[in-house]
Image (cartoon, coloured by chain):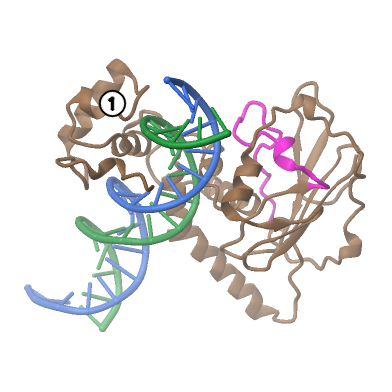
Chain colours: A brown, B blue, C green
Amino acid sequence: MVRAPCCEKKGLKKGPWSLEEDEILTSYIQKHGHSNWRALPKHAGLLRCGKSCRLRWINYLSPDIKRGNFTNEEEQIIIQMHHLLGNRWSAIAAKLPGRTDNEIKNVWHTHLKKRLLNTNNNQTNSNTKKRVSKPKIKISDSNSNSSCLTQSYEPSNAPNYFLEMETTSSNDTFSSDFSLQGKNIDNIINWEDPEDSLVTMLEIDESFWSETITTDDEISSTIPLNTELPNQHYPLNNSFENFQNQEGYGYSSNSIVNDDGMDFWYDLNV
DNA sequence: AATGTAAGCAACCGCCTATCA
DNA sequence: CTGATAGGCGGTTGCTTACAT
């Protein structure tokens, strides 16, 4: 049985919101909050479905929304987080306070994707023989010397680990997820919580976008199967499992292949 | 000035998961 | 355990505006 869309009730308005509707919704939420979106329009006197109200509030009316053009820094963050997370717009938005997933999605499709494609084409044209290395995600001991672009995340009471990423991929449909010899990175990193997250923003570094030749042999040793990960320090969540189910990607112990045939590696040195 | 085309963006649609009875 | 419901998410649509011819 297929559930009917919530907006199919007769008489519910669709399309752009009027100023009056905005004022009604804003006023109601400021007074009563939005604990129940489905019941909200009825109580507020709006001829909209709850989903529509929620979307309007979250994407436009909420006082937390930051308006205006994206800064270069914000765009770089989106680009890098997209390389890490793929089209997980809400997760990316969690790293950009005041920006909504919808807004980020729009910016990606209208600006950043084209920009990356152009950049990639220029690079390809300038050196067509250059092989693009496979993107590589590494988690390594913070005490080790590494020349890789390094993101430090050092939550209190946690061992010092670094998340490192090397990639030359500019594939606009690139999506990613990680598992570590059967242990997935989402069990280590709570992407949704900026307070507890191991991952803060990757530092912008020109080398991040440079093309390097990487052979499989260069990838350092992977974590032994019996290695204990410091899960006790990091809240578990099930986003990996959800993502896996939604996207249906196949993955093995240390490589992932997406629909476009792109694979990548990660390793964990402890 | 009129028309066609592209770009930008708000909003909708459908699916998924979490929750609860 | 099962089914219904609500909230959330990503993909997509379609309207509006800007720009080109």
The residue sitting at 92% across, 52% down in the picture is: A221
Q: In the figure, is residue A80 to the left or right of A41?
A: right
Disc 1 element: loop
Q: Chain of mark 1?
A: A
A187 to A254, vertically: above or below: above
Q: In the figure, is residue A216 to the left or right of C16?
A: right
B9 to A121, vertically: above or below: above
Residue A155 placement (x, y as % from top left):
74, 26
- Residue A125 on the magenta segment: no
Q: Which residue is mark 1?
A: A39
Residue A215 placement (x, y as % from top left):
86, 67
Residue A90 placement (x, y as % from top left):
51, 42
Residue B18 placement (x, y as % from top left):
54, 31
Amino acid carrying label 1: it is Ala
Residue A177 seen anywhere in this rendered image of the structure: yes
Which quadrant: the C terminus of chain A?
top right
- Residue A198 on the magenta segment: yes
Q: In the figure, is residue A239 to the left or right of A6?
A: right
Q: Quarter-wise, where is residue A248 in the image? A: bottom right
Q: Quarter-wise, where is residue A127 in the image? A: bottom right
Which residues fall within the magenta stretch?
A180-206
Q: Quarter-wise, where is residue A161 in the image? A: top right
B8 to A99, vertically: above or below: below
